[in-house]
Amino acid sequence: MRTPPLRSAVLAAAVLAAAALAACAPQDEPTVAATSAAPSACTPDKLATLAAGKLTIGTDDPVYPPWFADNKPESGQGFESAVAYAIAAKLGYAKDQVVWTRVTFNNAIAPGKKTYDFDVNEFSITEDRKKAVDFSSPYYDVTQTVITVKGSKIAGAKSLADLKGAKLGAQVGTTSYRAITEVIKPTAQPAVFNNNDDAKKQLQNGTVDGIVVDLPTAFYITSAELDNGIIVGQVAQPAGTPEQFGLVLDKGSALTGCVSQAVDALRADGTLAAIEKQWLAGVAGAPTLS
């Protein structure tokens, strides 16, 4: 079913937000201020998209569950595919007006002209990345998680200290890698991989003792892709700063404000929570390493 136009959704979001502030701020309230944009400018006939009347959304190739299903972002299946289509609908785009394009993780956040209107690919919002690209309001709070296999020397690790002598790895350019270098700080130089498929292969052949991925991915990999996979534990956020996923847009994009408003409206009306419940249910309960 098509969602309400953005104008009415934004007004509803404002009422709900005011009510929430009167009580207390919700824990998942966005921490990134949205760029202002007049709601009347957030319609397909007004938005300056790459292709008139179309919304071009970028993501990597391949993409993985639970974020996408069967490497088919156009299916609407999986958390991030569902979020992308909900945002498109909130902006007034029907499903057949959405065009997907494939962009590698590093290219998507590199400076320069973009081949997408926004990109969705588990991008954590960081100050360094904001120097090169815009981010929407956050749509998901996430933690990084260490996984391994039975028989590994870190299979029984209970603390960060237990990981000091481990050979760990993560995808290049990710906050997963930063979790290793900035939080775990092992004595061995971390391994860097082009993608999680490469990381899993090296974990399976014993080149590394463990790899770091986000928590929902950790649950999927250990339950569906690794033989004898184990979740060792979540890595605490540095200085208590929450890590959040945001949609990536070109630096200074005219679309940023409208996309953020759409995300905020979907959070306020419960759509994001419903999508999270549908696709990420059960990804909780892993111990936190300290």
Image (spheres, rainbow, N blue to C red):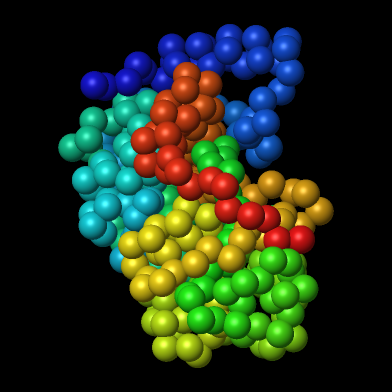
Horizontal and vertical percent for residue 270? Answer: 47, 22
Residue 130, can we see it? Answer: no
Give above or below for 75 relative to 193. Answer: above
Q: Residue drawn 48% across and 76% down? A: 150
Give above or below for 16 relative to 103. Answer: above
Residue 163: which quarter of the image? Answer: bottom right
Question: Closer to the camera, 3 or 205?
Answer: 205
* Left or right: 81, with 74 as reference point: right
* Left or right: 143, with 204 as reference point: right
Question: Closer to the camera, 216 or 73?
Answer: 216
Q: Residue drawn 53% across and 21% down? A: 268
Question: Closer to the camera, 282 or 212?
Answer: 282
Horizontal and vertical percent for residue 5? Answer: 36, 18
* Left or right: 214, with 55 as reference point: right
Q: Residue drawn 61% across and 61% down? A: 233
Horizontal and vertical percent for residue 141? Answer: 58, 44
Q: Quadrant of the C terminus?
A: bottom right
Residue 211: which quarter of the image? Answer: bottom right
Give above or below for 218 relative to 190. Answer: above
Give above or below for 155 relative to 245. Answer: below
Q: Residue drawn 77% across and 49% down? A: 240
